[in-house]
């Protein structure tokens, strides 16, 4: 219903990139440029300064962007107000999740939600915790689900579940029969580590420092961005690692990995993250309510 030219302009202004806007809108770049030029012709002024392959908003562009934000906000309120009256729960929700959550928690949750609300379209973006928080801050996603504490006070953070990290070793490893192991003991072995920005890595480093262990003393054998790759490396005897117990159900059942508790325990929250001022569609409220109930009934 909203002016397509204004929608295209708003996306370009938010991303400050015609190329990124075209990708997000599933349009060609010339089509995006054409829509923006039409709007500029309507206002008889430039909305963007284009210099050295970079763009920035002109004074007029900033004014149009401010009004566009208000227009789309009111449009969302109108749309969802009518849907509340009719009992319709539909729309598009853009979720972001860190790797552990996206691969091991969300598939079943979102599958159950879609069964109840087939008219809601969910788009999922996967990145590490830092990346998801950044996308929430930039309004690129409606809701983030992350695996590490979030320190941005401008965001709403709601813990949904507590996760436990454990040491994993291959069968036959000399630590295999230990019930618990300390961080200082773990530091003695070649270690397979998650990439920088990972919530798992961040929580692990904080735990080491709290125990008086210098993270620089870790014998990092390799850094991997894939949980499956890390498990495969440990199974192959290339080192030990620390992962969420929730990610290990298959390997523990098959006996290809051994999980050992850490002393002191390393627990971390899985949390929902969203903007304070962002207007929540009814579909978003329904998903949050469903996810809260799901987490209570499906403990790790």
Image (cartoon, rainbow, N blue to C red):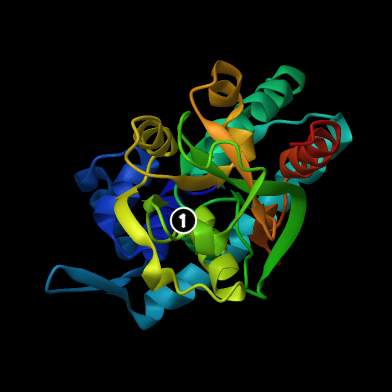
Residue 139, visible in the rendered structure: no
Q: Quadrant of residue 206?
A: bottom right
**185 to the left or right of 194:** right
Q: Quadrant of the N terminus?
A: top right
Q: Position of residue 252 (x, y in %)?
A: 59, 25
Residue 223: x and y, percent? Answer: 32, 51
Q: Secondary structure at mark 1?
A: loop
Q: Is 152 displayed left or right of 61 in the figure?
A: right
On the rendered structure, is 151 left or right of 50? right
Q: Residue at x 77, y 42 (%)?
A: 282
Judging by the rendered image, the residue that carries numbered circle 1 is 198
Q: Residues within 10 Å of mark 1 (few under 14, many from 20)?
A: many
Query: For the C terminus, which image quadrant?
Result: top right
Q: Position of residue 126 (x, y in %)?
A: 46, 43
Can the viewer see residue 212 in this picture? yes
Please state which of residues 161 and 36 is positioned toward the viewer in this rendering: 161
Q: Residue at x 35, y 35 (%)?
A: 237
Question: x and y percent of residue 22 in the render?
Answer: 30, 46
Residue positioned most to the bottom: 59
Residue drawn 85% across and 30% down?
A: 86
């Amino acid at each position: 219903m909203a002016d397509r030219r204004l929608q295209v302009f708003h996306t370009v202004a938010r991303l400050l990139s015609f190329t990124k806007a075209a990708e997000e809108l599933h349009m060609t770049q010339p089509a995006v440029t054409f829509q923006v030029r039409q709007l500029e012709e309507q206002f008889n002024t430039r909305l963007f300064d284009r210099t050295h392959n970079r763009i920035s908003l002109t004074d007029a562009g900033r004014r149009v962007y401010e009004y566009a934000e208000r227009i789309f906000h009111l449009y969302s309120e109108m749309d969802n107000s009518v849907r509340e009256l009719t009992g319709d729960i539909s729309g598009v929700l853009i979720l972001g999740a860190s790797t552990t959550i996206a691969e091991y928690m969300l598939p079943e949750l979102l599958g159950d939600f879609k069964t109840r609300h087939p008219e809601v379209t969910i788009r999922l973006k996967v990145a590490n915790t830092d990346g998801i928080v950044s996308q929430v801050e930039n309004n690129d996603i409606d809701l983030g689900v992350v695996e590490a504490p979030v320190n941005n006070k401008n965001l709403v953070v709601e813990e949904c579940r507590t996760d436990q990290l454990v040491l994993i070793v291959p069968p036959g490893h000399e630590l295999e029969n230990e019930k618990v192991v300390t961080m200082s003991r773990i530091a003695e072995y070649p270690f397979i580590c998650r990439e920088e920005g990972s919530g798992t890595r961040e929580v692990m480093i904080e735990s080491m420092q709290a125990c008086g262990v210098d993270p620089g003393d870790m014998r990092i054998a390799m850094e991997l961005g894939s949980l499956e790759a890390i498990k495969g490396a440990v199974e192959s005897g290339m080192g030990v690692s620390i992962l969420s117990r929730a990610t290990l159900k298959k390997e523990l059942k098959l006996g290809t990995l051994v999980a050992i508790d850490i002393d002191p325990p390393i627990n971390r929250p899985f949390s929902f993250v969203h903007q304070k001022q962002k207007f929540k569609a009814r579909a978003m409220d329904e998903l949050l309510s469903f996810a809260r109930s799901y987490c209570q009934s499906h403990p790790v």
